[in-house]
Image (cartoon, grey):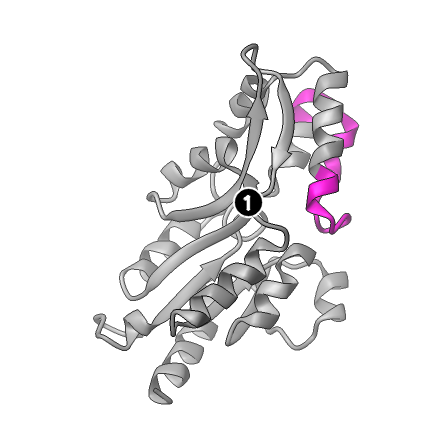
Amino acid sequence: FFSMPNCRNHQVLITLDLEGTLIPDVWPIIAAKTGVEEFKITTREFPDFEELMAKRIEAMNKHGLKLKDIEDVCRQIPPLPGAKEFLEWLRARHNVIILSDIVFELGTLFMQQLGNPTLFCNWLEVDKDGVVQKCTMRQPNGKEHAVNAFHALKYKVVAAGDSYNDINMLKTADRGFFINAPSKIESEFPQFPLAKDFQHLTELMDKALQEIMDAM
């Protein structure tokens, strides 16, 4: 692997999904802790994140759950094994940005556990009593738009994710990889190599990054 960064390393940017990639999908865990069945659905089953969040907020209010209740569960969820070390390896060599549909209020709880990488995400509108009113999307299809913006800044982009809401990011990036993707999604998009764990993803990314920089 690369032993030290150089100027070419900083012409390449890594974009990573968060839930299902670096941390578990949090909403099924919230469902198990709260007993709210509606929380079990994720973007692996329901690709429209904005509509999915509207359904989650509706369920929160129906069951009398406030933001603090959701935050309390998330504080107990650790990153996936090896995720922090993988990020440390990447960040020592390249610029890394987490592109996630998670909301800021929950995402920041996980950034602290992952060494505080940069996170681009959405956010919640919450009233004075802590009741969630709505989810505000930074931008529709924000992951794809972010990669296009990085390209406009003359970056090459290598991306990794696990779910339907990552597909446009992976397609737009110079190289895209799956990790932890369900077999259904993997079979629908066979053009993206599937890493079986972080060590394998490290090897796939290392090879791709070397090829990209050799071509510069």
Residue 195 can be seen in this image: no
Measured as percent of width and height from the top left, residue 24 is found at: 57, 43
Measured as percent of width and height from the top left, residue 118 is found at: 38, 49
Q: Quadrant of residue 182?
A: bottom right
Measured as percent of width and height from the top left, residue 132 is found at: 62, 22
Above or below: residue 11 compared with residue 147:
below
Residue at point 51%, 33% (across, down): 106
Element assignment for label 1? loop
Magenta-drawn segment = 32-52
The quadrant the C terminus occupies is bottom left
| Relative to 130, 87 lies left or right | left
Measured as percent of width and height from the top left, residue 135 is found at: 62, 34
Residue at point 47%, 64% (across, down): 149
Above or below: residue 130 compared with residue 106:
above
Residue at point 35%, 82% (across, down): 213
- Single out the residue that lies furthest toward the bottom: 215
In this figure, which residue is indicated by the disc labeled 1? 138
Q: How many marks?
A: 1
Q: Nearer the viewer, residue 87 or 56?
A: 56
The quadrant the N terminus occupies is bottom left
Query: Which class describes the residues within 10 Å of circle 1: few (<14), some (14-19), or many (20+)?
Result: few
Above or below: residue 193 compared with residue 143:
below
- Single out the residue that lies furthest toward the top: 129
* Residue 150 on the magenta segment: no
Residue at point 34%, 88% (across, down): 214
Q: Nearer the viewer, residue 196 or 9?
A: 9
The amino acid type found where label 1 is placed reads Arg
Q: Quadrant of residue 88?
A: bottom left
* Residue 50 on the magenta segment: yes
Residue 185 can be seen in this image: yes
